[in-house]
Image (cartoon, grey):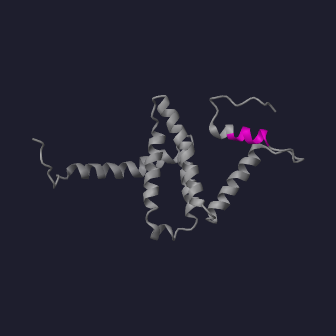
Amino acid sequence: MSSALPSANAMPYSIFLSFVHKNIPDVGFPVSPTHVAGAFWGFIFLWTTTEFYCADILVTTLAIIYPAWMSYKAEAKNSFPTQWISYWIIFAFLYLFEFLHFIVYYIPCFQTIKLLLLLWCMYPSNNNGSEVIYGNVLKPALGALDSWVSSQKPTVEFPKDD
């Protein structure tokens, strides 16, 4: 096992796994990064499914850190991939939906469902959740809303500056 740090081009998740794998104490049997990742996501799944203490804060933290970092990296390169723009629109709609406590309260395992949905939206592939949800649901709905708002005449006229 090499003690060198991963390259700068490595994904944050692989950097995390290499850090954890390098610092795992010897337990007498081989522990792979897959074991560590499985234990981590299993723990997160149990925590959010049982809605244990601060599960909503945990989900929010996991849903913000990686996309915020990737958005920062995209802005630093002056490239704006539609995945991250779509992700933040979906994120905003999901958190607006969460204000409807009388509906969210009756959805079992809501935090787990929300985390799985946002992880699918973060997944770096061509058919990730951001592309599918935004392209098929939100973009047509927002387009219809935009045309309706544009067709409305302003009912209040502001006084013009003299």
Given residues 27 and 108, the one toward you in this image is: 27
41 to the left or right of 30 = left
- Residue 126 can be seen in this image: no
- Residue 23 can be seen in this image: yes
**From the image, which quarter does the C terminus lie in?**
top left
Provide the residue span drawn in magenta.
16-23
Where residue 37 appears, as percent x and y from the top left, is 71, 48
In magenta stretch: residue 18: yes
Rendering quarter of residue 53? bottom right
Where residue 134 appears, as percent x and y from the top left, is 43, 48
Rendering quarter of residue 108? bottom right
Rendering quarter of residue 122? top right
Residue farthest to the front, as pictured: 162
**Mainly helix, strand or loop, the magenta region?**
helix
Where residue 1 appears, as percent x and y from the top left, is 82, 33
Number of dots carrying numbers: 0
Where residue 47 appears, as percent x and y from the top left, is 65, 61
In magenta stretch: residue 1: no
Given residues 132 and 8, the one toward you in this image is: 8
Residue in the picture at 54% in, 51% down: 118
Given residues 67 and 118, the one toward you in this image is: 67
